[in-house]
Image (cartoon, rainbow, N blue to C red):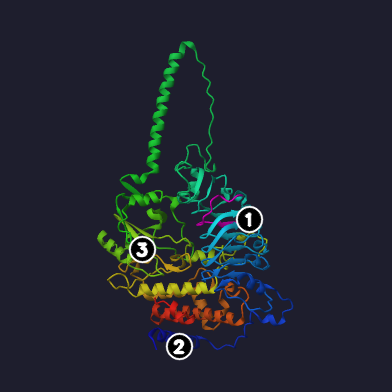
Amino acid sequence: MSPPMLHAAILLVVIAAAASAQSTPSPAPAAAPSHNNHTSNCTVTLPDAEIIFAAFSNVTNFPLPRHRPSCRHVRRIAYPSRGLAGAVNWSALGSLTGLLTVDLSGNSLDGGGFAGGAFWRAPSLRAVDVSRNRLAGALRLDGAGERVASLNVSGNAFTSVVGAGAGAGLEVLDVSRNAIAAVPEGLRRLTRVRHLDLSRNAMSGTFPDDLPPLDGVAFLDISENRFSGVVGFAWVAKFGRAAFLNAGNASSLLIEENPPATMTPSSGGKKHKRVVLIVVVVVVSAVVAVLAAVAFMTGCVACGFERRKKKEKKKAAAWEDDEVAVGAVKVAATAPVVLVERPLMELTLADLAAATSGFGRESQLAADSASGGGRRSGAAYRAVLPDDLHVVVRVVDGGAVAGEDDGEAAAAAGLRELARLRHPNVLPLLGYCIAGKEKLLLYEYMEKGDLYRWLHELPASSMDMEETGADMWDTMDHNKKSIGDWPTRYRIILGIARGLAFLHQGWAGSSGRPIVHGHLVPTNILLSDDLEPRISDYAHPSSRNNNDNTPESDVYSFGVLVFELVTGQVRWDESTVSWARGVIRNRKGLNIVDARLRDGEEETTAVETEAEREMVECLQVGFLCTAHSPEKRPSMQQVVGVLKDIRPAPAAADETP
């Protein structure tokens, strides 16, 4: 028997022994009713299975349903990143009267004329995500009405948008990374939009006249387009400088970098000009005196404007000085930036400052969610460097890089070791800058955000709600509702385990010392475009942050993450972990599984039972990892082996940690 299989067998025996030894005798619970028990009593059959078959019959890798009577409405079609290819019959899907959400993102679907009136006829449809496919031609929104609240078609090849004004109910609209040549006509009628992303197209239009009312918009990105007009400072301050990066030619789109002297906070970027009428009564005997006074005043005003112009220029380009302000500390602007994989790219701290508007608030990423910990390191800023390199610049405490008393050479050596870490589930360090006591680390920008945001906050592409008449943002219970299907969550669990096992096995350079994360919480798990997890905010082995942490403490934190992903519950502490362990010990783990993971489109009883088995076994893995005694917790390498046995993958697709 191979070592991974041996580990798996040992752990499964431990699971059974722990459950048997620690549980108290109790009457056997009644069997839970099957989700499909009502099928035998079905009096009204629905055509949903036939509709799905008609819609996806030309799509490869889509699990077509059997031709059989259906008593339940199809509410969600969620197959992200499943290798789907071909053309969907969108018109057929419009006949699904119970359909709430569609998520077919990250596949290879093609065809032109996506959606159109027939698709939007689905009376319950709320959210659609077909991002990162190969859809082309016209994006047709005519008929979308006020029901659809979220639409993401980014990363396709759409060339135009037809009937944009028909989507009156849209609150989230993402058409970024397409080839749309003109601002969609009627876009300004979308008065409910709160999240609008038009970036990386070839749109010609006028800002802000061709856009929806911006006062109610919380997120806007029109970068990499061909806009004209004037972007007032108030809009730059609200949405950040990056939202308007290369949004138009310098001659056609004017971006105000500093507030006008007469602008008020509520002016919305409009300048209020004060008109003053001066009546001069010229007396013949005083002409000379008046002219002299006018000349004197003109000279003073000119001097004043010149001083103000120099002052504002200095403020707008503070990073052009000899020093750069990073937070409350000023450091040398000439400090070099080391890009590990691009050694020929010569950058300095001044370049980072220029790309982040002087480390200004408009470029700063939002603070961490209240998920029970947040990150250890300091403020983070989004920046776009030459060659379209999108990065996050994070300011860290020196002790997170090397010992507190170590010098610059030790810090650089520690960072070079961290930069050697390469694993699909570990966020790579792209570069760094050491300026005195300030350390700035450069990471890849992850547009999907962190695990906490995806699991507990986002209402977008995988919403599934019964409230059909209320505002979706107000009715969503962030503490109880989550998104995503079970295969996606399982893949995230396995990915985190693989990344953590990699860190623990001592792959940091030549030192061979294991890296202990010490702060494994959902906000430190970032997600790639295909929802692959990447562990961030890990520290060098010599960091003082690791002194009180061990691999066993990381294993415990991983077990808590497993509980959170399977149950969908938020804010875990010692008492909630103890509660979950008690439920699992009594073999009632299925009772705390996230209800939304068990409430998808209609499936056979066998498929539902298999998924439920996997969820329960993953909870048992969490039970082992959260054992009170550290020596009783498995290693992360053993955990990976058990997880792979829970849902075996084809041999060709199998990976090692």
The amino acid pointed to by label 2 is Val
Residue type, label 1: Gly
Along the line of sight, the residue nearer the viewer: 540 or 498: 498
Q: Which label belongs to residue 345?
A: none
Which numbered disc flags the more N-terminal residue, 3 or 1? 1
Q: Residue at x 48, y 54 (%)?
A: 200
Placement of 148 over or under 232, stated as above or below: below
The local secondary structure at tag 3 comes to strand
Residue 328 visible in the displayed image: no
The correct choice, above or below, for 40 with respect to 458 in the image is: below
> Which secondary structure is most common in the magenta stretch?
loop
Q: Which residues are magenta?
A: 167-185
Gap in Å between the C-alphas at discs 1 and 2?
A: 56 Å
- Mark 3 is surrounded, within 10 Å at the Cα level, by few (under 14), some (14 to 19) or many (20 or more) other residues, namely many
Q: Earlier in the sequence, mark 1 or mark 2?
A: 2
* Relative horizontal placement of residue 132, taking residue 422 as reference (left or right): right
Question: Which residue is under mark 3?
Answer: 429
Vertical arrangement, residue 539 with respect to residue 227, above or below: below
Provide residue 615's location: percent of width, then percent of height: 53, 78
> From mark 3 to mark 1, how far is it between C-alphas?
41 Å
**Circle 1 is placed at which residue position?**
167
Residue closest to the eye, 345 or 220: 345
Instruction: Using the numbered discs, state the Cα–Cα distance from disc 2 to disc 3 in whole angstroms.
Output: 39 Å
